[in-house]
Structure formats: C-alpha cells, structure tokens
Amino acid sequence: MVHILLVIIYLAFISLGLPDSLLGSAWPSMYPEFGVPVSYAGVISMIIAVGTVVSSLQSDRLTKKLGTGKVTFISVAMTAAALFGFSVSHSFWALCLWAIPYGLGAGSVDASLNNYVALHYASRHMSWLHCMWGVGASLAPCIMGYALAGGQGWNMGYRYIGILQIVLTAILLFSLPLWKQQRSEDSDDSDKGDSDKPLTLPAIMKTPGAKAIMVTFFCYCALEQTTGLWASSYLVAKSGLSAETAAKYASLFYMGITFGRAVSGFLTIKLNDTKMIRLGQVIIIAGIVFMLLPVKSSAAMAGLILIGLGCAPVYPCIIHSIPMHFGADKSQAIIGVQMASAYVGTCLMPPLFGLIANHISVALLPVYLMVVLVCMIFMHEKLNHMHNARKIHS
C-alpha cells in the first residue's frame, strides 16, 4: 500500500509542475489573439498567485477536515477544470475568471502534499518528488510547442495538459481508500484533542520560529524566481549575447535545479536537512561569485548552473525539516503559511528587481541575489539556534 501511494504522490508532483510553466510558453501566441499588451500576462499570474496564497492559508483547516487524499483530488480536479476553461476561452477576461480556480487548486494541494511527505517519508523522497515537479514543468512547454508547431493552436496545448490532469484526477479518485487507510493509521498513532483543531493565523505567528521560517522561505523563492526571470536579460546585458542565445543558456539554471534534486536525494542519505540547506547556500554563493567575475559569458553561465545546483536541495529540505522544528501537530499549519509567504516572495521580489534594472542596471542582478541570500542564511541560522536552544532546555 505504501509503495502504491508513493507512486501516486510522484505522479501528483508531476501534475503540480505541468500548469506552472504553461502560461509563459503559451502567452506569445495568446495575447495577440485577445488584443491585449504582452504585460497582461502579469495580471493573470497575479490572480493565480493570490489564489494560491488564499488556499495555502486554508490548507491546515482543509487537510484536517478532509485529509490529504481528498484535498489532492479536489485540487487537481479544480486545476483540470481551469485548464479546460483556458482552452475554450476567447477573451482576456474569461482567462482572468478561470485563473481563480487555477490558483485556488494549486496552493492547498502544494502545502498538503508537502506536509504529508515530510511526515511520512525520508528526505530523499522530498528531493526526488520536487525533481518530478521539474519534470512536469519541463514537459508542459514541450506539449504546448507540439500543439503550436502542428498548427493546433495554444487552446489545444491547454487541452492536452487538461486531459493529463483529468487522468490523474481519476487515479486520485480510485486511490482515496489508500489515503483513508493511512489517515486511520495516523489517527491511531497520535493523540486526539488540540492537534485536530486547525491553528489560527495569529497562533501560528506566535509560534517560536514561525516568522524565521517564513522569511527564510520568502527569500529562497524570491531568489529562485528572480534568477529565473532575469537571467536572460543579465546575459544579454553583460555578455552581449543575442536574446535567443541568452534564453537558451538561461535554461541551464532550471537544468541545474532538476539535476541537483535528483542528486540531492542520494546525498540526504548521509546528510541531514540542515547540512543540505547549508551546502546549497554555499554553492549558491559560489554561483553568484562566478556571475560577478569580469570575464566573458562562460563564467556567467557557470554561475547560473551553480545557483541552480545550490537551489536544488534548499526548497525540499526546508519543507522536510518543518516537523522536526515545529512538531507533527503544527507542521501542516506552518507549511501552509510558509507556502503563502513563498508566493508573496515570488510576486514581489522579481518585479522589485525589474525596477532596479530599469532605473539603474540589470548588471546588479548578482548583488541583488547576494543580499536576498544573506537574509535567507541569517534567518535560517536563527531558526536553527532557536531549535538547539529548545533542545538544551527540554
């Protein structure tokens, strides 16, 4: 049963990645049809992001009421419906409406599944599962490209992904008894009482270490998204590469993340979550230093690969460490708020650097990343210090 359920969770993480990269790959073909500026993609992404923040904050309540299996099933079904909604939309405002269930379906399942894996599986599975997210995020543009190259239009690209999500929804529906059985075993092994009551946001914020982990995750996701969004522009500005060549080289960052998470799964057998996070941070520093070197594009490209490799263990290991820092009874609530903090970081920090690039220079990207990284390191070490202090006093 455990192995079958783990396979289903791996499929679910591929499903989480599929929609994430779809809008960016389809938008160049979409916005001329709707007669809107290219910048309007930001409106849709913001609606999706707000939905993910709202549903992430409700993940503790929903998971304790319905269980991880039902939350995953309902969320993936909502995402599938939204994808089909996109595929039949003929106006920008219709896209905005379908973006609401698109975002609501993403946040709670992300938080719920991550917490489930953190509680029930070893750290290596968390790394490999997030590697599967990278597989899904890489697969979606290929499917969209196939639809566009075949003259089928962006609508069919969304429909193909929607069909894949429907197939997964059916698998999740038939797997609900497995989740229910696991939930029953968890209930037998844990104490009833306050742990069944969802934590309120004020109570979460008063939990020692909660603010530190929120800022840590905010900074990590800000660093990852800012690098991904502005890497091409940085390469063009620093190395004089063409936009097409820079875009190709910028993908090295995501290749570094995907490959790094596959390798991280093996490293976690020897290293705990804290050591993996620190290792990742050191590699990110090395990557930023490479980007700062006053040499040709090869150093900048090596830097992007190193930053991707460094990012690889940080995200999954932070999540996997939550039960250790806060306990199994609070982990779902903490992860939900942490995910919401991450989405806020991805919404605010890349545009903030856009203002810096516009008014000063895009060449400041490594400096910006280093500032964010230093803040992340400081807050993570503060969290570890608080954890060690509690262990000494207990």
Image (tube, rainbow, N blue to C red):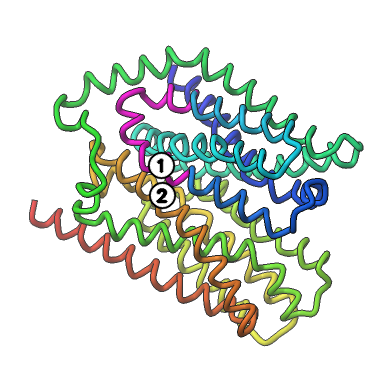
- Residue drawn where x is 53% and y is 54% of the image: 312
Give the residue type that dot 2 points to: Ala
Q: Say which amino acid is labelled 1.
A: Ser
- Using the image, tell me which numbered label, if any, was put on residue 56: 1
Residue 372: x and y in percent read: 45, 71
- Magenta highlight on residue 72: yes
Figure quadrant of residue 147: top right
Give left or right: position of 65 versus 341: left
On the rendered image, what quadrant is the N terminus found in? top left
Where residue 208 appears, as percent x and y from the top left, is: 19, 55
Residue position for label 2: 340
Against 156, is 260 above or below?
Answer: below
Q: Considering only vertical position in the picture, is 77 above or below 247?
A: above
Question: Residue 391: x, y in percent?
Answer: 15, 53
Dominant SS in magenta: helix
Answer whether residue 289 is magenta in the image.
Answer: no
Q: Tell me which segment is drawn in magenta.
A: 52-73
Q: Earlier in the sequence, mark 1 or mark 2?
A: 1
Residue 135 seen in the figure: no
Residue 269 figure quarter: top left
